[in-house]
């Protein structure tokens, strides 16, 4: 809890520092908002010409994409920059400074930087999310509302784990940034599989996205739950899987990948 | 001329040196194309044709559109904006300016070098794989000719636009925003992702008024033979007129930019 407090304070101070340059800060956010509308624009144009995709309607697809969008925004805000920088830190030897401070190296690395532009994703996503929920006419219960929070947390953990795993590859291979990008970039890479329901893909893709790289738990399965979809891939129980998959995947990323990478680290000594 | 050929060769060799990047970019393109084709197949499920302003559009049209668009994106995109931005931020621009070379021609020859690399290393394998995996529509020889001309114009247009945006970094220090913005503008307003014939009329009218659709949409409609040969010629003429407009703008911007150079430190 102490480290978490420390992290929040560091972020707050850094955020204030960046906001000193008001124009830069807000123009960054504005540009990010505009660019994030491109995918929404694309979905909108597609549904001007087609009624459904694999039985999913326009607003259902928007909800699906938005879940992915918010989750990636939150996880990206915290983990994207540190994991992108890790490769260079290892190569230049500046990673040493992370190890000598008296706090957990992981928390230390995470608190070195964050990307404020991801905040714009979270804000835009949240607005679109509530707008879409309103349009969709979902029968809300108390349980559903509570579970929504767990869906978001679980999704953030899954996306964060992907960032940690791909970033930690920097301990073993040289070009880890390219892999990090492949796993989080909204316009290219694996996340593009999530824009539409994964049920449109062949079986082997669905299997990979469910059981190997569990991206489908970020938005497809929880959307099936929220929208009461009668057809769910593989097994209906997977609808509830997001929180547990998130926790397990995060434990895997932290203990098996990050910890091992750390053990493998030999300073370049420069 | 010789010196620019050296720049071209240099850019080609630099690109080849980064093998890991080649691999990841390639995987990325193939994956993106695979996703795009799957999306169109799913949308067309139970729908044989969609009627649009250019007539009926079939699934085969859309699969071809996605393949050709991905193919074009492999070599049309360039790194001008970020390149100029880095030069200005690091002060390297001062050295470029004292050299007895033309800055624009220098960047252009670097782009050509990169483009040759992209065509040989990425475009050709990508095309072969796509033809086998997804199947593609081949148009008649006249369409191919017009398509070729319009692609050359598209490359030139994209070069001059990115060059002008790059020069804006002389005034606006947050140039990464412009780079980012332009990439997304291209995805949406150029028809690189979704063909403009699917767009609602009012939006379409605005887009037609802008130059971006000349970069992707025009070569693609010509390839798919969605417009008559006369319209093809008109569209190519439109490209040339916009090119001329941008050349004039570029001259004016450049003249002011060089007077504006502020090199921080050194």
Image (cartoon, coloured by chain):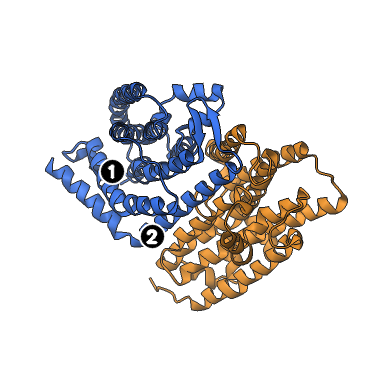
Chain colours: A orange, B blue
Residue A147 in the image: state x and y as whole percent.
79, 55
Question: For this rendering, which residue is in front, B59 or A117?
Answer: B59
**Circle 2 is placed at which residue position?**
B23
Q: Nearer the viewer, mark 1 or mark 2?
A: 2
Query: Total label count?
Result: 2
Same chain, marks 1 and 2? Answer: yes
Q: Is residue A265 above or below residue A183?
A: below
In this picture, residue B110 sits left or right of residue B73: left
Foreground: A166 or A229?
A229
Q: Considering the image in quadrants, where does the C terminus of chain A appear?
A: bottom left
Label 2 marks a residue whose chain is B
Q: Residues within 10 Å of mark 2 (few under 14, many from 20)?
A: few
Q: Which mark is residue B111?
A: 1
Percent across and percent down for residue A5 are: 70, 60
Residue B34 location (% of width, % of height): 49, 52
Residue at image position (55%, 40%) is A32
Horizontally, residue A222 falls left or right of residue B200, namely right
Labelled pair 1, 2 in contact (Cβ < 8 Å) = no
Q: Is residue A199 visible?
A: yes
Q: Residue at x 53, y 59 (%)?
A: A82
- Looking at the image, the residue that sits furthest to the left is B2
Vertical relation: A269 (above or below) A58: below
Q: Is residue A8 visible?
A: no
Quarter of the image for the N terminus of chain A: give it.
bottom right
Chain assignment, label 1: B
Q: Earlier in the sequence, mark 1 or mark 2?
A: 2
Residue in the image at 67% along x and 65% along y? A3
Q: Residue furthest right?
A: A142
Dot 2: what SS?
helix
């Amino acid at each position: 809890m102490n480290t978490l407090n420390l992290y929040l304070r560091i972020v707050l101070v850094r955020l204030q520092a960046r906001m000193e340059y008001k124009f830069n800060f807000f123009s960054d956010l504005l540009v990010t908002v505009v660019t994030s509308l491109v995918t929404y624009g694309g979905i909108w144009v597609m549904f001007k010409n087609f009624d459904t995709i694999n039985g999913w309607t326009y607003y259902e697809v928007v909800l699906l994409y938005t879940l992915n969008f918010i989750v990636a925004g939150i996880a990206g805000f915290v983990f994207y920059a540190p994991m992108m920088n890790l490769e260079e830190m290892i190569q230049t030897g500046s990673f040493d400074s992370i190890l000598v401070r008296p706090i957990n190296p992981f928390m230390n690395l995470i608190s070195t930087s964050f990307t404020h532009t991801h905040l714009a994703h979270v804000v835009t996503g949240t607005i679109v999310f509530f707008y879409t929920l309103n349009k969709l006419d979902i029968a809300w219960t108390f349980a559903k509302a509570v579970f929504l929070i767990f869906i978001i947390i679980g999704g953030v953990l899954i996306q964060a784990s992907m960032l940690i795993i791909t970033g930690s590859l920097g301990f073993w291979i040289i070009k880890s940034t390219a892999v990090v990008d492949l796993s989080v970039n909204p316009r290219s890479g694996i996340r593009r599989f999530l824009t539409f329901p994964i049920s449109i893909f062949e079986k082997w893709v669905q299997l990979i996205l469910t059981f190997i790289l569990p991206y489908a738990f970020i938005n497809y399965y929880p959307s099936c739950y929220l929208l009461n979809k009668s057809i769910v891939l593989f097994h209906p129980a997977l609808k509830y899987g997001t929180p547990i998959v998130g926790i397990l995947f995060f434990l895997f990323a932290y203990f098996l990948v990050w910890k091992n990478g750390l053990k493998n680290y030999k300073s370049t000594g420069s | 001329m010789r010196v620019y050929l050296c720049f071209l060769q240099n850019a080609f060799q630099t690109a080849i040196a980064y093998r890991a990047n080649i691999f990841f970019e390639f995987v990325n393109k193939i994956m993106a194309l695979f996703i795009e084709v799957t999306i169109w197949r799913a949308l067309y499920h139970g729908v044989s044709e969609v009627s649009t302003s250019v007539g009926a559009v079939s699934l085969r049209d859309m699969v071809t559109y996605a393949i050709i668009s991905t193919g074009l994106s492999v070599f049309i995109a360039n790194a001008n904006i970020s390149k100029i931005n880095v030069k200005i931020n690091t002060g390297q621009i001062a050295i470029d300016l004292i050299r007895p070379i033309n800055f624009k021609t220098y960047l252009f020859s670097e782009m050509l070098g990169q483009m040759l690399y992209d065509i040989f290393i990425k475009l050709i394998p990508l095309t072969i794989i796509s033809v086998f995996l997804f199947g593609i529509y081949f148009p008649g020889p006249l369409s191919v000719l017009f398509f070729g001309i319009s692609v050359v114009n598209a490359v030139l247009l994209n070069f001059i636009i990115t060059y002008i945006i790059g020069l804006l970094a002389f005034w606006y220090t947050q140039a990464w925003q412009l780079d980012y913005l332009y990439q997304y503008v291209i995805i949406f307003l150029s028809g690189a992702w979704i063909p403009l014939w699917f767009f609602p009329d009012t939006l379409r009218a605005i887009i037609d008024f802008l130059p971006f659709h000349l970069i992707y949409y025009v070569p693609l409609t010509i390839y798919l033979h969605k417009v008559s040969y006369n319209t093809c010629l008109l569209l190519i003429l439109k490209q040339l007129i916009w090119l001329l407009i941008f050349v004039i703008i570029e001259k004016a911007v450049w003249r002011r930019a060089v007077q504006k150079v502020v090199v921080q430190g050194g």
